[in-house]
Amino acid sequence: MTSNKTEDKDMRSVVELMDLRDKRALITGGSGHIGSVVAQTLIDLGATISILDLDIRACKKQAQLFNRVRAESAYPFSCDLRDERRTRLVVNKVIEKMGGLDILVHCAAYVGTTQAPGWAVPFEEQTVGAWEDATRVNLTSVFVMIQEAKKALSESGSGSVILFSSIYGFVGPDFRLYDGTEMANPVGGAVSKGGLIQLTRYFATMLAPRIRVNAISSGGVRRNQPKVFQERYVARTPLGRMAVEEDMKGAVAYLASDLSAYVTGHNLVVDGGWTAW
């Protein structure tokens, strides 16, 4: 009995597709909650990474932990992404240190818990200064970094950019969740995250075919929110829980690797079904 099935001997296995050995990655916000998980995911898949954040001590501590497991697998860098000149310089320093760049992951952001004057306060007290600072970190820095990294990512042969957005980048907040709490949802955060999704589409077409650009929009991640907020959030989520950082690992592994070699301009929503209603 003969088979009509044609075998493609060049077809790679899933394990081979997700292998990031010899790949070099830069992670902004790399010592934060999400950024640390991104860093661990890329390290697990074999990549060498540069951890970029505001606090150089936190970056060095995290890099040391990774380097104990695999020598010279992680490098620490510090930069205030509000500063255009320093942002451009640090991108080039990273590329020089690692000898190139294959993956850029942008996690750095002003979020609801960010402590900055005029930011996580009632709407009437939110300031233009805080709005502009958040926009520079959340959105403008992506524009700046891709300008500097474009050549290296193009030369990679498998350049991948991953931008962390949010469900509030494409749907409005449900403010009933916040009633009776001191939690804040600054308007500048939602607007800048929405801008990231459009920036994803723009760069996906402009940088093709050499560089893929995709976004991850996460829902609420459980940390130390008030119990009443968590209960309300869970009740509204089809999968019946808030996210944990580990829930981002699969999305990052997919978009960073050749598992998604034919995917660009996509916004991968990781929200437990929140936006499916």
Image (spheres, grey):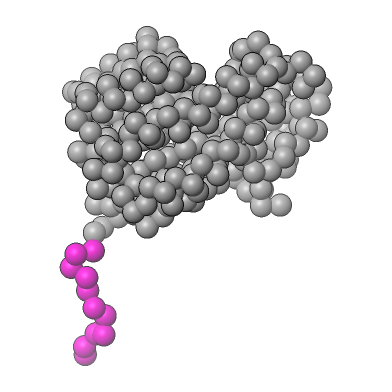
Name the residue located 72 percent from the left edge and 32 percent from the top edge: 231
* Most foreground residue, 82 or 104: 82
Judged left or right of residue 106, residue 116 is: right
Name the residue located 55 percent from the left edge and 43 percent from the top edge: 197
Can you tell which quarter of the image residue 110 is in?
top right
Judged left or right of residue 97, residue 51 is: right
Residue 87 in view here: yes
Q: Examine the rendered structure and indicate whether residue 155 appears above or below residue 264.
A: above
| Residue 2 part of the magenta-drawn span | yes
Chief SS of the magenta region: loop
Q: Position of residue 11 (x, y in %)?
A: 23, 63
Q: Examine the rendered structure and indicate whether residue 52 appears above or below residue 56.
A: below
Q: Position of residue 38 (x, y in %)?
A: 40, 32
Quarter of the image with the N terminus in it: bottom left
Residue segment shown in magenta: 1-11
Marks counted in the figure total 0
Judged left or right of residue 221, residue 105 is: left
| Residue 145 part of the magenta-drawn span | no
